[in-house]
Image (cartoon, rainbow, N blue to C red):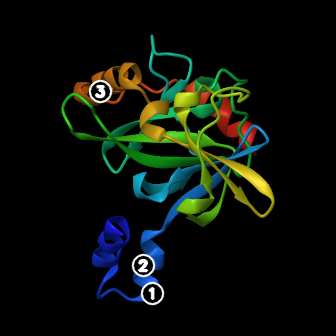
Amino acid sequence: MMGALALMNKTAGKSDAEVQMQSTEQYLSFQLGGETFAIGIRSIREILEYEYLTEVPMMPDFLRGVMNLRGAVVPVTDLALRFGRARTELGRRTCVVIVEVLDPETGAAQLIGVLVDAVHEVLTIALDDIERAPQFGSKLRAEFISGMACVDNRFIVLLDISRVLSVDEMSVLAGIEHDGVMPKMDESHSHEELHAIK
């Protein structure tokens, strides 16, 4: 009874639509290596068409480079490489999803680009339809997954982006941010990537 009373107090005075919104979350779904993943919409700032990236020497393989976003240096991560898979091949639908992640040490917000094969749509998923991340049998590390959702008879992996971009990666990315200088463009490599899209 106490639990039911507490729930009634929380929802009292709210419309059915407001109560419904509280029991759902929105996710941006996207394609990566033939699979569908999703990231919580609250972490996403914008979606950009792929443009050439500036490579940064001595960075991990999964860090494809940095981009200039209205004067800010934003590192771009290849999620496929981060997951231990083959490098993402560039195509006409390749996108960079700009997400905001909090630095666990400073609490400051860090913008990071995520390279994906294609962006699909924004999904509204009921919290009751989200299952816990599997402890085994998944192709991803369990801590990367916040849950699994069944949408239109297919399972979508819901990513915990704060764990995918872990503390170690954040320290690397923070070094680029604090440098404040865009590295020199590797023109030959950039032209190769642009040619691959055409």
Disc 3 element: helix
Find disc 1 in the rendering and name its residue: 16
Res. 6 image quadrant: bottom left
Label 2: how many Cα within 10 Å (few below 14, some 14–19, many 20+): some
Say which of 141 and 174 sits in front.
Answer: 141
**What numbered label is drawn on residue 174?**
3
Q: Secondary structure at mark 1?
A: helix
Which residue is farthest front? 1
Horizontal arrangement in the rendering, residue 171 relative to residue 120 (left or right): left
Q: How busy is the neighbourhood of tag 1: few (under 14 within 10 Å), some, or many (20 plus)? A: few
Image spot of residue 14 (x, y percent): 33, 86
Q: Foreground residue, 38 or 134? A: 134
Position of residue 151 relative to residue 50, above or below, is below
Q: Do the residues under discs 1 and 2 have CB atoms within 8 angstroms?
A: yes
Using the rendered view, name the quadrant where residue 147 is placed.
Answer: top right
Compare marks 3 and 1 and give the one earlier in the sequence.
1
For the residue pair 113 and 137, the one nearer the viewer reads as 137
Residue at horizontal 45 percent and vertical 85 percent from the top: 17
